[in-house]
Every structure is written in structure tokens, then in C-alpha cells.
Amino acid sequence: MIERDRPPQAPVDIAVIGAGVVGCAVARRFTLDGARVCVLEKAVDILDGASKGNSGILHTGFDAPVGSLEQRCIADGYAEYMEIRDRLGLPLLETGALVVAWTEAEEARLPALLDQARANGVADARLLDKAAIKAREPHLADGARAAILVPREYVIDPWAAPTAYMMQALTNGAHLMRGAGVTAGAFDGDLWRIETDAGPVLARAVINCAGLFGDRIDAMLLGDSHFTIRPRKGQFVVFDKAATALVSGIVLPTPSATTKGVVVCRTAYGNVLVGPTAEEQESRTDAATDRETLRMLIDKAATIVPALADQPVTAAYAGLRPASEEKDYRVRVEADRRYITLGGIRSTGLSAALGLARHAADLHATFAASTVPLSEPHWPRAPRLAEHAPRDWAEADNGGILCHCELVTRREVAAALTGPLAARGLGGLKRRTRVTMGRCQGFYCSAALADVTAGRLDPPMALPDRADD
Amino acid sequence: MTEASLKDGAVEDVAVAIVGGGPAGLAAATRLAEQGIRDLVLLEREEEAGGIPRHCGHYPFGLREMQRLLRGPDYARRLAARARAAGVDIRTRTSVVRLGPGPHPTLDLTTPEGATRLRAERVLLATGVRETSRAARLIGGGRMRGVVSTGALQSMIYLKGLVPFRRPVVLGTELVSFSSLMTCRHAGARPVAMVEPGTRITARSFARALPALMGIPVHLETTVEAIHGTDRVEGVTLAGPDGARREIDCDGVIVSGAFTPEASLARLGGFAIDAGGGGPVIDQYGRMSDPAYYAAGNLLRPVETAGWSWREGLTVADALAADLRGGPPPPPTIRLSVTGDALRFVTPSRLSLDGPAPAFDAVQLRAARAARGLLTARAGSRILWTGRLDTLPERRILAPIAPLLAAGPGAEITFALEEGRETS
């Protein structure tokens, strides 16, 4: 039984469709700017689509197309993340990234890439020779010919960040409806009436942040769409925590015209990941992994950092990127109908989200009266998931460890199951606490977790009828 | 721990810290306490000591240790009670977060009261074994509810009375896979198939009759390629011996067996890990690459019975006690390894010469597949020992240590299986 939230009783200023990383950032921006916001999310938890499976990197945008909207939003988003992260308790693993050239042809592309980085305002990017590469990444395979160091490409927590954006929206008055897939909508010249699985919402403006379904929402609400989502699957393999001794930062390949390629990098949760693949597919929901591809990724990782071949695999996952026919973001403004689409945010959404939210606010100001920003907004603290920062297990009265591999306490799980953003699915709970993310994948903690979440999660971990024991 | 140690951040000092309260850890703690080593703590992260047998609601446990036939939970309770009766300080809900280097290693701990630290003269790791996860086996598909290991299934059913599915597919034919059939039966679930990648059922014969008795088909030379479903498992894709794929309906998958030592603390601590077996590298005293550390039980290798692990706890405890009283054994100078694709690992894989009584008088090996032939230990061209072998994966293989010591200091001993050969 899906738990659905009720619609707000009065019309809101902004209906945000979709609670992925972009929707969370947009909800926060408009709320802080003084608007009344309602977020409509079809899943039981936020971050349940494209945003649940990315690489967790805060990009500088050094390799984005010069002059693109994407580049501008990444730069703005990066700057705002750095500005607000202390107040929201968001982590930053200051790793830097190496763009490594393994072939002569790749090496020949580095100078142009460096020029691009500088044109994009990433002035501290610089070329490294073999010795300098080895000094930064001693376990890197031999054969790296040269590299560009991008010092301010960092690893962040891809779940705590958008969760904190949504928490800040909610604690400052925004309304979140989960289990509220949009089914229809109409604009009467003054108000939008959006029909959802959880009832109708009245709003003065709509911001479409529906990710993998962005084109369909446009078609449903505007009658047409200027773009088509072409889902691009990215599979990842996660190595266990001891692998962090082998990788000090982010190791990128030299990008080609078509793809950023496969990255090996640390994660905020203390692991090393390799991925993503780039597989075009029809389905907007099927994020299945397959054995051959996972093997290929492990082999690929071992060609970059050979010692990874002996490291145990902790997890495998796939994310779906909402790519479209074009590389840049697909933004549409319908001033007359008070409607903005933030579409085709294919792979840099985590870095660009805060910048995109500002961009959306600027676009909104072109057709709507301005509101008065909150003078003293509340600043909630994000869940503390990062491995390199202090965590709950080190503190008194934590209730004891529930998930041993990831050192998640009972207090953390209890907290994630309560409040306006209470997790309603195991995926949501995982993104709030790290439970079951570790090497045992539930061998040790499934029973305790099924017990404490009984009656709380959809779908439940166990069937409703108990064993006759 | 004391209130004071929590508040002022002081470090508690003990002679011996044992990490893990399963059969090996409890046996070692009990033995050390009985030998008069009182300054001893056993750290157990679960709410109760006892280890995996706590949720094995089936027979047979306790034959070797208690000369009785017990179910797992009763056996676990008795082992823990024995340790307490011997005066062992069992600290449950205490997790070790980090193992520091010796000598006098410091362990970072966490408890419900918060973080704390412990310093020990010697540390014995007995963190056991777990089943390899679906992810580590690279089984494809989506991530939905209803995919569990046998361990998770048993603790859900026997500890919490919770059932994750009604019609699961069982991957694996090890003893534990058949045990999962019994667990399903206990909870009213009816497995629809067993799937085994190998050419033969792995478990010994007495369990093999179970699927037929329960009307469950067994598919050999078959793998689970992918698991399907949206929120919950709805089916699996099987790949058969001829590469043919087919789908079968089910509402869950039991990813059973393929045990791997729970060696992550040792791995993170930077101690030498045996790539083949996955446990810490040890010598015949159970001593690890850092001589302040010992290891016993299923942490050493996948996988042995509770009784076997229990006995290892006793013998490694004896070696550790002798070390504390009379000084450490000489450092190991002989290295052992396996070669060829028929053998997976050998442990202990280090041997020292001219020391006191060892914890192990035989090395343990495992085969990677069904194999038959002459098992040979060589140092260079010199044959130290041979033995006939006819084995399956997961079966215990032993080779005596005494003949290996003749190789002398600095020797590199290699075990190989010469298939098809019956005599030397």
C-alpha cells in the first residue's frame, strides 16, 4: 500500500514536479526566495529516479561545452555548494581529478582540453608529467602518458546533498507530496490545476523537474514536448573500503566526442567505484545490471589501477541518465502559461542542481511578480553519511550498531523513519542512512532491519504474515 | 568498560582481546580464562554471543564439543554460558571499528554509549564467515526485495519470525543450501528450484535426497544470470549447460553458500590477506602477519563446521597463551602456496621452525572444482609430501605440517594437484 501525502489546502506559488536532485534544489531555491512551494513526487521516496545512481562527483565543469547553459549551471551550482555546505553539514572530499591520457592520440587532445578548462573558468587546471601522476596516484597502472590535474573536482555525498536541499525547503514551509504521480493538468489563465495520484494541487506556476519523464510531463501539461528523453543506462561496480588505499582521488579518462568515459574514484561512503557505462535504451525505469558488463567494468578498473583486481566487490548498481537528442540541457519557458521545463539534465545534475535552481528562479522572475526572500531561514543539518567525517556511531546514546558493514546506528535508522521526510522504502532508507549498502548486502542486518521497519516500508522487507515460530 | 574511560577518552588495557563471539571466539576465551588469563575481554557486536549457530534452527551441533546433539540456538547459548561460567567478560553490542598495529595494538570500538578504545597485548580475531553477496557474484538484474542469503533468511525466520517470500529459487547446493530448504519448510515457503553452476551437487550425500523428497527440481551446470521484478522478485533468468536461457517464475532468490571470510577488519588494518581463501595469512600458531594478532575459526577460510571452528579456537588459544607466558614463537620463514586451477588456497601459509607446540598440525586446502589425482607438496624439485585426492569444492583437505618443515628456512613450498595420477 503506497503511502500518499495530502495536497496543500490553499493554492501554492510553485508546483515542482519531481523530487530528484534538481527538484530538491529548485524547491529549496523558491522556498528561500519566499515562495510557497509544493513538490510532487510519484515514488514513495525522493531521489528515486535518475538521482539514485550517479558517481557522486562535484564537477567544476572544466570539460563542459564553452558557453553552454550546462557549463554556467555547473559553475554556479559548484559555487553555491561550497558556500552553503558548512551550514547544511554537507561533506567534501577534496580529492582533485586526473584526466589521464593512455594513448598518443589522447595525449594529443590534452592541450585543447586544457584550453577548454581555462575558457570555462577553471584556471587552476594544469598538465602533469608521468612523475607527478605517479606521486598523486601511486597505484595507477604504468602507461599513463600525461594527465591534466583539475584540483577542485571533488567527491561529495550524492544523497545527503539533495536530501539536505529538500529538508531545507520543508523546514522553511514547503510541502512535499510523495506517491503523487501527475496524471493531468490544466492552466486556467491564473492557476494550474495539477491532478495527481494523491489529489489535485493548485499552483500559480509549474517547474517540470521530472527527469526521465520530463518530456512526457511537458506533453501531458503543455500538449507537446520540445525534446525526447533517451534514457542512457550507466552501470557501476563498487569496491570494498580497503580499496581506498589504492585510489586517492578521481581518475578520469580523456573524454572523447561522445562520452566522458569510465571513471575510477573514491566515494563519500569510503569505497571506490568504477563506472558508468553509457547504454542507450528505451525503458525509463529498468536499471538492471548484467554480468558481462559488470565483469567488463572490473577488468577496466584493473587496467587503470591493477591492484583493484584483488579487491572484493561490495555492490553493483545502474543509474538511468535522462539524456535527450542534444547534449545541452533542455530548458523551456512558457511565460504565458507560467511554466518552466528543466529537462535533459543528463549527467551533471548533482553538480549543476543549485545553479539550475537559480536559473529557474531568474526565468520565473521574467513572468511572475517577485516574492520576499526569507530573512532568517532555518538551516537543517544533512544526514551524516560521509566516511571521512564524524558519524553517529562515535557518539553517546546511538542505540548500538544495526548495519555492521556501514556502521549505521539504530538511532540513525529511527531518525530516518520519522519526520516530514521519513523514508518509506528500503531504497529511501538506504539513501538516508547507508543501511545494507555494505559488503554483506544484508547477510548480517536484514533480520534486525526487517524487524525495526515492519509496517513502515513499501514494499516491506518481509511478508505481512509471520512465520509460525 | 568504565564510565571514566568513556568520559575522559582513556584507553582500557587488557592482556587479550578476542574479536567475535561465535564458536571459535567463545572456545578461545573459555580456554584462556581456564588457563588463568583473567585480563581478557570478548567483543561481540550482536546482542548475544553465539555467532552463526544462533540462527541455525536445525541439528546437528555440539557433538564434538558437548557430546550431545543440539539445535544451533541451544548450542550457541551453551557455549556462551560456558564462557561466562569460566569468567569471561563478554561485551555484547560492542563493534570493533579499527584494528591498530602491534605491539600493544589499540582497538577503536563503538558501543551504544559511543566510541571508546582498548589496548591489548594480544588480539585474537574470530570474525567468522558469511555468504558471498549477490553483488559480489555479479548476478545481474534489478535491485528489488526478495533476494537474501541463507544467513539473512535464517535470522529473519528463526530470530524474528519474518518471512521474505513464499516461492524462492535457491542458488547453490552446498550444505547451507539444503539447510535453507529446511528453513523454508519451517516457515511454510516452498522453493521452486535449486540451481547449481557445477556439474555435481556440492553437499554430501545425506542432504541430496531432500529436493526429491520435497519435490524441488535441481538444475546442474546452470547459473542465475539475472533477477527480474519491479519492487519484488518476479522471476529469474537461468543459463543452462548448453548456454540456453530460460525464465522461471519465483518471488524470491536465496543466494546461498559461496562463503567468504569476514576479513574486512583485517583487510582495513593492512594485515596480509590470503588472496585464495580470503582470510588473514597465518602460521601454524594461528599468528597473523602482525605478531600481536592471532586468528581462528572460519575467518581463516571458507567454510568449516562450528565444531571444527570451536576446536581451532582452543588450539590457537593454547598457542596464544604460550606466547604470553614464554614469548613468541620464532618468526615464520617458510611460505606455502597452491598452483594450478584445481586448488584454491592453503592455510596456514606460513611456517616457522623450531618453535613450541603449534595450534595446527595440518594445513587445510580446498579444491576449486571436482578434482581427482595426486596432491603433491614440493620445495623446488624436492617432493616433501604426497597424498591421493578425490574431492569436490568446499570439502576439507588436510596435509600434515611435520613433513613440510623438512624444507628448511626460506623454502617456498607449492601444493599442486596432478590430475589423473594416483601414485607417486
Image (cartoon, coloured by chain):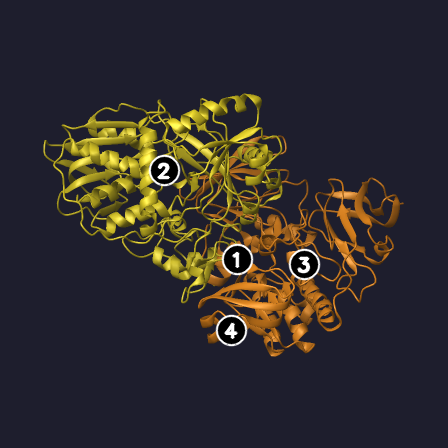
- The Cα–Cα distance between marks 4 and 2, rounded to whole angstroms, is 45 Å
From this viewpoint, is residue A26 visible?
Answer: yes
Label 3 with label 4: CB-CB less than 8 Å: no
Mark number displayed over residue B274: none
Q: Give the percent coordinates (x, y) of residue A220.
A: 23, 29
State the quadrant of the C terminus of chain B: top right
SS label for mark 2: helix
Q: Residue at x 56, y 63 (%)?
A: B107
Kindly identify which residue carries mark 4: B1
- Mark 1 Cα-neighbour bin, 10 Å: few <14, some 14–19, many ≥20: many
Kindly identify which residue carries mark 3: B290
Label 4 with label 1: CB-CB less than 8 Å: no
Label 3 with label 1: CB-CB less than 8 Å: no
Kindly identify which residue carries mark 2: A351
SS label for mark 3: loop
Front-most of A252 and B154?
A252
Which of discs 4 and 2 lies nearer the camera? The answer is 2
Which of discs 1 and 2 lies nearer the camera? The answer is 2
Which chain is tinted orange?
A: B
Relative placement, left or right, of A306 versus A41 is right
Q: Give the percent coordinates (x, y) of residue B55.
A: 54, 62
Same chain assignment for discs 4 and 1: yes
Which of discs 3 and 1 lies nearer the camera? The answer is 3
The first of marks 3 and 1 along the sequence is 1
Kindly identify which residue carries mark 1: B154
